[in-house]
Amino acid sequence: MIQVALRVARAATGRSKFVKFAGHYHGWFDNVLTNETTFFPSLRVDTVHAEPQSAGQSSKALGDTVVLPWNDVETLRAYLDRHGAETAAIITEPVMCNTGVILPASGYLEDMRRLCDVYGVIFIIDEVITGFRLGLSGAQGLFGVAGDLGVFAKALGGGVPIAALTGRESLMSLIATGAVNHSGTYNSNLITVAAAIATLDALAADHGAVFSRIQAIGQALMDGMRALARAGGDNLIVQGYPSVFNTAFGDNAPIASLSAYRQCDKAKQRRFLDVLLEVGIRPTDRGTWFVSAAHTELEVENTLSAVRLALEASR
């Protein structure tokens, strides 16, 4: 759906370039699999060139991709001052969940929304992770900032693979009329659509009561991990939201930027995660944790026992 969103943005604006941010992940396609530039960061943003991250990736596919630092509105504004007229879209995770679960700085998403309006750029919010985890209206509802297009997946299907593109009627109509091609064997697959509808019904039931349950379980887990770290003198950082948070080891909390995340102790994190895996607890290998409605107080108790062992082993 990321590729569809970018195609719609290009069709609507007649422009080709798009901005993504270092540390954000929007899939493995050649034009979005990049977190580095040859000139980053700098206000002299006329020389930004994205670089491949994988063997076999076409560098030519990155010709329209611009990578800028996240949570840095001045660099974004400087770039758009020079290149807004050739920029079709800005795509962002509303929370940098793929790297450290780093929260947006106060007012940052609002500033990005305003800059898109000023320069006629399509604002794409990638809610593949945050959608239906941070609430029924996702991160856009939580922060009160709406994108022109939104991409959802993962939690939308309650375990069944599905993805969806949402957006303003004037943009979505480009697909409906056939002006923008979006063809695929599994488009509107009845089984996955039925699963998504059932999932949304369950999430919305009793005024979203399930989210209160997830919040309570996740908060208990985060608080318990922090307490264990304090008791053992460990520099474990636990940050994010009860439904999606991150663990890392470092002395500067909270982690507010990609550069700060990269300064964390990766070797200690690796030992910590390896021990957890050995005893049956599996966050992602980046240290991202997800809490769902299926988890209970028992899972919290068992996980905290495992965290205690992992912290001891990682010292």
Image (spheres, helix red, strand yellow):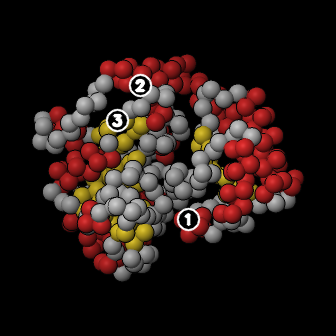
Q: Residue 257 bears which disc, if any? A: 1
295 and 146: which is toward the camera: 295
Asked if residue 249 can be seen in this view, the reply is no
Q: Residue 139 bears which disc, if any? A: none
**Vertical comparison of 309 with 198: above or below:** below
Mark 2 Cα-neighbour bin, 10 Å: few <14, some 14–19, many ≥20:
many
What is the CA distance from the residue labelled 2 to the residue labelled 3? Answer: 10 Å
Q: Residue tagged by mark 2?
A: 196
Residue 253 location (% of width, % of height): 68, 62
Amino acid type at mark 2: Ala
The residue shown at (29%, 48%) is: 3
Is 184 left, or right, of 311 in this rendering? left
Q: Which structural element holds mark 2?
A: helix
Amino acid type at mark 3: Ala
Mark closest to the chain's N terminus, 1 or 2 = 2
Residue at the farthest front position: 56
Q: Residue 164 bears which disc, if any? A: 3
Amino acid type at mark 1: Ser
